[in-house]
Amino acid sequence: MKREYRLKKRAAFTYVYKRGEKSASRHLLLLCAKSGEGLKIGLSVSKKVGNAVTRNRVKRLLREGLRPLEQKINPSFMYVIVAHPSVAELDYADVCAEVEKVFRRAGKLSE
């Protein structure tokens, strides 16, 4: 995922949490809300997922799972991906599949 697409501000995360539509899979939760800035994606990996090493690994996997989908994702929304603790046990291919599945369920991927 490119740095320009990252959601960084606490206020933006709060906005998406309060106003966003939810879509879930077994290991991930996707929240999406209208954006005036274009495509922005934030990752939320809590301490329930594991220690710092595990959380950072999960974030890296999620960013790489988003990379092939960047051009397909609807750019008029801000997204927050919340990782459940079970995502720490997945490998790269499974994380990519989960990310794509949650975006498809939300209807935010173009073909």
Image (cartoon, rainbow, N blue to C red):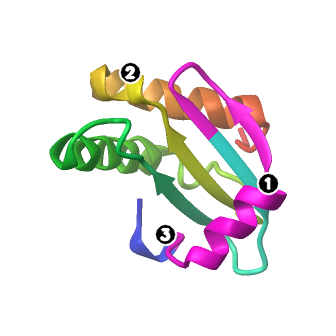
Q: What element carries label 2?
A: helix
Q: Is mark 3 on a helix, strand or loop?
A: loop
Chain-order first, disc 1 or disc 3: 3
- How far is the residue under mark 2 from the one under mark 3? 22 Å
**Residue drawn at x 41%, y 41% as measured from the top left:** 65
The numbered dot on residue 6 is 3
The reply, left or right, for residue 8 in relation to residue 65 is: right
Chain-order first, disc 2 or disc 3: 3
- How far is the residue under mark 1 from the one under mark 3? 17 Å
Residue 57: percent from the left, percent from the top?
23, 43
* Residue 26 sits inside the magenta stretch: yes
Few, some or many residues within 10 Å of mark 1 (<14, 14–19, 20+):
some
Magenta span covers which residues? 5-29
89 vs 110: above or below: above
Find disc 2 in the rendering and name its residue. Answer: 94
Q: Quarter of the image for the C terminus: give it.
A: top right
Q: Which amino acid does label 3 sit on?
A: Arg
Find disc 1 in the rendering and name its residue. Answer: 20
